[in-house]
Amino acid sequence: MTADVNAYVTATSIMLGAYGFFYSAVSPRMDAADGLATPAEDPDKRTEQERTLRSGIGTARVLGFVALLVFLIFLKPAVEEVGDIHFDLDHYSALDVSFVVLVAAWLPIAVLTLARAVSLKKNLKDYEQT
């Protein structure tokens, strides 16, 4: 275990908490965009729907890239923390495992959020084609 693991666990925990708070604050933008697969006939409603979709896409992209950035920032220290993989559980402390799990958690968060942006972007193409 490196001496910095305590600081890394604290930093990743705080970032995850801040990300969760921010996600909760802006996720209604993505939720509103999720239900807009079919363009409205009325041009004014259609414009509003398109604006909502673009907002949802932008929000999902920002959240996804932030999660990916945090993952990449802490990837090297996490790999160094693991070092040579030992199957003896006594080799790793709970803090070591916590840090690696916290870092690894950022990757699926990034992938799922960016996948949501891609899905919303597909819906937007339906608006641009009609």
Image (cartoon, rainbow, N blue to C red):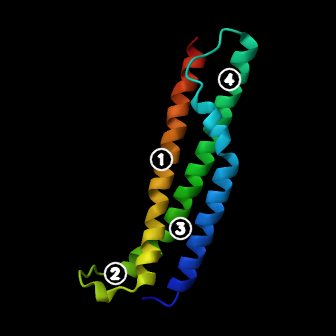
Please report contact status of discs 4 and 1: CB closer than 8 Å, yes or no: no
106 relative to 81 in the view: left or right:
right
Q: Which residue is mark 1?
A: 112
Q: Which residue is mark 3?
A: 73
| C-alpha span from label 2 to label 4 | 50 Å
Residue 53, above or below 4: above
| C-alpha span from label 1 to label 2 | 28 Å
Q: Amino acid at mark 2?
A: Gly
At a point 51% along the width and 27% down the height, the residue shown is 122
Q: Earlier in the sequence, mark 4 or mark 1?
A: 4
Q: Which residue is mark 4?
A: 49
Q: Which residue is mark 2?
A: 83
Q: Amino acid at mark 3?
A: Ile
Residue 51, above or below 7: above
Please report contact status of discs 3 and 4: CB closer than 8 Å, yes or no: no
| C-alpha span from label 3 to label 4 | 36 Å
Q: Position of residue 31 (x, y in %)?
A: 61, 37
On-image quarter of the N terminus: bottom left
Q: Earlier in the sequence, mark 2 or mark 4?
A: 4
Q: Nearer the viewer, mark 2 or mark 4?
A: 4
| C-alpha span from label 2 to label 3 | 17 Å
At a point 71% along the width and 9% down the height, the residue shown is 42
| C-alpha span from label 3 to label 1 | 19 Å
| SS of the residue under disc 1 | helix
| SS of the residue under disc 3 | helix
Q: Position of residue 102 (x, y in %)?
A: 48, 69
Please report contact status of discs 3 and 1: CB closer than 8 Å, yes or no: no
